[in-house]
Image: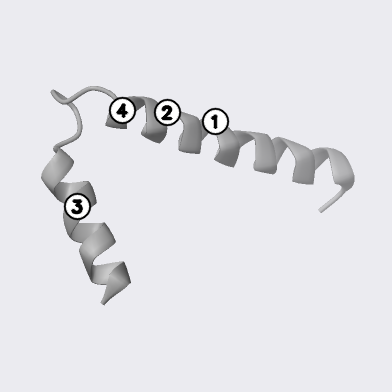
Amino acid sequence: MNELDHARTMLSLAEKDLRGLRGMLDSQVFAEELFGDVVTQKVK
Protein backbone atom coordinates (compact mmCIF):
# COMPACT_ATOMS: atom_id res chain seq x y z
CA MET A 1 0.00 0.00 0.00
CA ASN A 2 1.47 3.34 -0.99
CA GLU A 3 1.48 6.36 1.31
CA LEU A 4 -1.54 8.01 -0.33
CA ASP A 5 -3.66 4.87 -0.03
CA HIS A 6 -2.57 4.46 3.58
CA ALA A 7 -3.49 8.08 4.35
CA ARG A 8 -6.91 7.62 2.74
CA THR A 9 -7.51 4.47 4.75
CA MET A 10 -6.53 6.19 8.00
CA LEU A 11 -8.77 9.18 7.19
CA SER A 12 -11.68 6.86 6.46
CA LEU A 13 -11.20 5.09 9.80
CA ALA A 14 -11.00 8.43 11.63
CA GLU A 15 -14.23 9.57 9.96
CA LYS A 16 -15.97 6.38 11.12
CA ASP A 17 -14.71 6.96 14.67
CA LEU A 18 -15.98 10.55 14.58
CA ARG A 19 -19.42 9.43 13.36
CA GLY A 20 -19.52 6.92 16.20
CA LEU A 21 -18.60 9.57 18.77
CA ARG A 22 -21.24 11.94 17.39
CA GLY A 23 -23.79 9.16 17.62
CA MET A 24 -22.94 8.77 21.30
CA LEU A 25 -24.09 12.34 21.88
CA ASP A 26 -27.61 11.50 20.68
CA SER A 27 -29.53 9.42 23.22
CA GLN A 28 -31.94 8.41 20.45
CA VAL A 29 -29.04 6.72 18.63
CA PHE A 30 -26.84 5.46 21.46
CA ALA A 31 -28.13 4.06 24.72
CA GLU A 32 -25.97 5.10 27.68
CA GLU A 33 -26.42 1.64 29.18
CA LEU A 34 -24.40 0.10 26.36
CA PHE A 35 -21.40 2.28 27.09
CA GLY A 36 -21.68 1.59 30.81
CA ASP A 37 -21.68 -2.16 30.21
CA VAL A 38 -18.58 -1.94 28.01
CA VAL A 39 -16.74 0.13 30.61
CA THR A 40 -17.75 -2.23 33.41
CA GLN A 41 -16.45 -5.24 31.51
CA LYS A 42 -13.16 -3.50 30.67
CA VAL A 43 -12.62 -2.61 34.33
CA LYS A 44 -13.20 -6.21 35.40
Residue 36 percent coordinates (x, y): 19, 52
Q: Nearer the viewer, residue 7 or 37?
A: 37
Q: Is residue 13 above or below residue 29?
A: below
Mark with earlier residue (4, 3): 4
- Give the Cα separation between the discs numbered 2 and 4: 6 Å
**Alpha carbons under labels 1 and 3: distance apart:** 24 Å
**Camera-nearest label, 2 or 3:** 3
* SS type, badge 2: helix
Taking the spot 31% from the left edge, 69% from the top edge, the residue there is: 42
For this view, does 43 lie left or right of residue 11? Answer: left
Residue hosting label 2: 19
Circle 1/circle 3 CB separation < 8 Å: no
| Res 32 → quadrant | top left
Q: Residues within 10 Å of mark 2 (few under 14, many from 20)?
A: few
* For discs 4 and 1, the disc positioned in front in the rendered view: 4
Q: Which residue is mark 4?
A: 23
- Residue to which mark 3 is pinned: 36
Q: CA distance from mark 2 to mark 3?
A: 19 Å
For the residue carrying disc 1, how many other residues have a C-alpha within 10 Å: few (<14), some (14-19), or many (20+)? Answer: few
Under mark 4, the amino acid is Gly
Q: Amino acid at mark 2?
A: Arg
Front position in the image: 44 or 4: 44
> Would you call the spot at circle 4 few (<14 residues within 10 Å), some (14-19), or many (20 or more)?
some
Name which residue type carries label 1. Answer: Glu
Report the residue marked by disc 1.
15
Cα–Cα gap, marks 4 and 1: 12 Å
Q: In the rendered structure, are the residues bearing label 2 and label 4 in contact, judged by CB atoms less than 8 Å apart?
A: yes
Of the pair 14 and 9, the residue shown nearer to us: 14
* Marks 1, 3: nearer the viewer: 3
Task: Verify CB contact (< 8 Å) between mark 4 and mark 3.
Answer: no
Q: Please, what is the three-letter code of the amino acid marked with disc 3? A: Gly
Q: Crowdedness of circle 3 by 10 Å Cα count: few (<14), some, many (20+)?
A: few
